Image (tube, grey):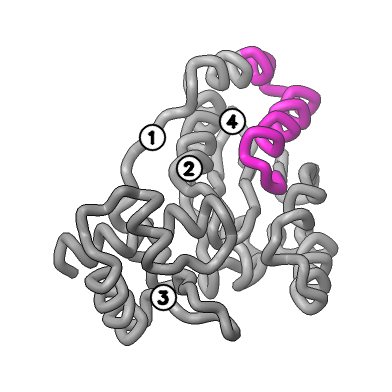
Amino acid sequence: MDKRKELILKTIIKEHIKTAQPVGSEGLVDKYDLDISSATVRNEMADLEAEGYIVQPHTSAGRIPTETAYNFYLENLSEKKISDAEARIFEKLLAKKDEISFKQAAKAMAKISDSAVFWAFHKHNLYYTGISNLLHQPEFSETGLIYDISEVIDRVDEIIGQIFNDLKFGPQIMLGSKNPFSQHCSAVITKYRLDDNIGLVGILGPTRMNYEKNLALIKFINSLLTEK
């Protein structure tokens, strides 16, 4: 993919992550002060659509990224760190590394990520929080998707039980069709070893979640859990 097309695709993804709305060419040029004409952006967007990176939902004039686009985006994801203030919060919460502190940390993660957070202290002991964050996302307002997300929540413990042993250790992203929780969601998770115990903590949100922020958060939590 050439640099101009890549810039336009990344800008569409960033705008969709922020707004949850389909993205049009003119709004993109104005808002992001792109040094490209609207006509050129329209042509590039037509190519991106033909190549399967963006799609037109319903009768909207704008486009939204596809799973292919998000996979491309993740392959080129820039490294980000959580803020010093956020780091201090989790260093304090996870000082003891016990079940109470894990639950408090999960609540803080849900607030910062505006997503649902699950924490399996081991395979058969699960805590989750922030479900309302998930249900408030615009894409889950459609009746069919509300049902799908509710079913995911009901089956979180069962799904974790199925994937727990096969997951590799360390931070990872599960997107769309590769996400065991639901193809309509993404999960940023880490499997960790703490003394003789193996646990799993993750952020569950829409496909257009803020991956940079959530991955930075999971990486930091993982570093706190696995430091000697």
Give how far apart the Cα atoms at labels 3 and 4 are. 42 Å
Secondary structure type for disc 2: helix
Q: Badge 1: few (under 14), some or many (20 or more) residues near its Cα, within 10 Å?
A: some
Mark 3 or mark 4, earlier in chain: 3
Dominant secondary structure of the magenta stretch? helix
The kind of residue on which mark 1 rests is Lys
Give how far apart the Cα atoms at labels 4 and 1 are. 25 Å
Which residue is pictured at 57% across the width and 55% down the height?
Answer: 19
Which residue is pictured at 31% across the width and 81% down the height?
Answer: 46
Residue under circle 2? 215
Front: mark 2 or 4 = 2
Give how far apart the Cα atoms at labels 3 and 2 are. 23 Å
Which residue is pictured at 65% across the width and 20% down the height?
Answer: 94
Give how far apart the Cα atoms at labels 2 and 1 are. 8 Å
The magenta span reads 92-117
Residue under circle 4? 194
Q: Is residue 109 magenta?
A: yes
